[in-house]
Each structure stands twice: as C-alpha cells, then as structure tokens.
Amino acid sequence: MRVEELAHTHVADCYQCGKCSAGCPMADQMDVIPSGIMRLVQIGEVEKAAKTSAVWQCLACQTCSTRCPKSVLVADVLDSLKQIAVEKNIVHPKARRTAIFQKTFINTVRRNGRLNELELTGFFKIFGFFNDYSIPKLMADGNLALPMILRNKLHFKPGSPVKDKAVVKRIFEKCFEETEK
Ligand code: SF4
Ligand code: SF4
C-alpha cells in the first residue's frame, strides 16, 4: 500500500485503541480524528482520508506516534496522505493555500539551494490568487511591506549563494526518487 511505503509503517497494526486521538492537540479541530484517519486507510478509503482537512491541521508534533502502543507512525501516515492529496489534486478546499505555500517553499529552496523570501512571497501571492481569485487575500499583508523595509527585514537581494548547488540538486533528486518508488 502506497501510504505504508511513504510512511514506513504498517496500518494493519492499528487496533483502534484511540490513544493517538486522545493525545492529539488538534483532535478537537479536526474533521476526522487521527484514529479515524487510520481506520479509513485500513479499510482502503485512502482518498477519503486524503481529502480531510485533518491531514493539513496536523502539527507533526509526533504525540500520536509516540503514544501508539503498536508503534504505528500515525504522524507519518497523515503526512503521506498530504502528499497523496497533492498528487491527486484532492486537497481539502480549506487547505489549498497551505498546499500552495508548501509547494512554493520547496520549489524556492530547490531552485536556490536556500530560502529566498521575496521569491517565496511573490510566487505564493500569484499562485494563491489563481486558486481563488481573491483580491483581498492578494493585497493582505501589503501594509507590512513598508514597516519591514524600514526595519531592514525585507531582503530584496537573495542571500549569499549556496556553495555547492549540485549537492542540493542531488538531495532533491534522491527525495523524489524515494517518493516515486
Ligand atoms: S494509538 Fe495506535 S493502535 Fe491506537 S488507534 Fe492510534 S494508531 Fe491505532
Ligand atoms: S502529529 Fe498530528 S495527528 Fe499526531 S498528535 Fe500531533 S497534531 Fe495530532
């Protein structure tokens, strides 16, 4: 099962004790609690699990995985479902901007070898706008630009280049190889 390959865990080991949900700091905000997500995956409803907003609300705090008496890596299961949601274009509507931010962030680091804040902000605003065509969201935070410039917190020039971009390229290639297996 792809979820198991991505998360490096066995979902069948879960016996629905609920300890993961009981310890999850986000459970009361989630549309499906972590043990419920585990159950959906167990019965083959992977897409249904990947469509939840819960997978995007997860803080990756690892409490669930630590508490699980069966050593199921619950947090990694949720993380793998995020990846599947992006690949299948079934990200929960409330989380689409989060997914866009994460993708833009990774692409920026991939291109530059490190984070370029201005590039990240620019691309995120553009791709975010084409997600919902919201002018208020496009303009949001604009009032912060001047105070940030005055405090020298907005860097127009990218930082010093990474010494060996080839290493960064290899890291990304290796990661993509792993996820495509
Ligand atoms: S704590 Fe482990 S065994 Fe219990 S419901 Fe969660 S994943 Fe399943
Ligand atoms: S890793 Fe996510 S699902 Fe697990 S306890 Fe933390 S917030 Fe909840």
Image: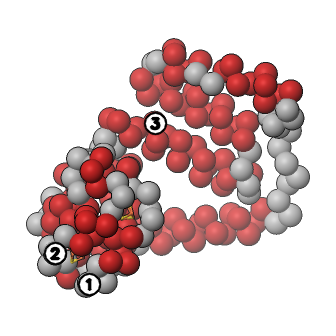
Secondary structure of the residue carrying tag 2 is: loop
**Number of other residues with Cα within 10 Å of mark 3, as a class: few under 14, some 14 to 19, many 20 or more:** some
* Amino acid, disc 3: Arg
**Number of other residues with Cα within 10 Å of mark 1, as a class: few under 14, some 14 to 19, many 20 or more:** some
In the displayed structure, would residue 25 be above or below residue 138? Answer: below
Q: Which residue is mark 1?
A: 69
Secondary structure of the residue carrying tag 3 is: helix
In the displayed structure, would residue 39 be above or below residue 157? Answer: below
Of the image marks 2 and 3, the number of the one nearer the N terminus: 2
In the displayed structure, would residue 100 be above or below residue 27? Answer: above
**Ligand 1 closer than 8 Å to label 2 CB:** yes
Locate residue 16: give its quadrant: bottom left
**Quarter of the N terminus within the rendering:** bottom left
Q: Position of residue 140 (x, y in %)?
A: 58, 22
**Quarter of the C terminus within the rendering:** bottom left
Q: Decide if residue 172 is in sight here.
A: yes
Secondary structure of the residue carrying tag 1 is: loop
Identify the residue at horizontal 58%, vertical 28% (top origin).
125
Identify the residue at horizontal 85%, vertical 54% (top origin).
161
Q: Is residue 124 left or right of residue 69?
A: right
Q: Position of residue 155 (x, y in %)?
A: 82, 37
**Ligand 1 closer than 8 Å to label 1 CB:** yes
The circle on residue 17 is: 2
Q: Which residue is mark 3?
A: 97
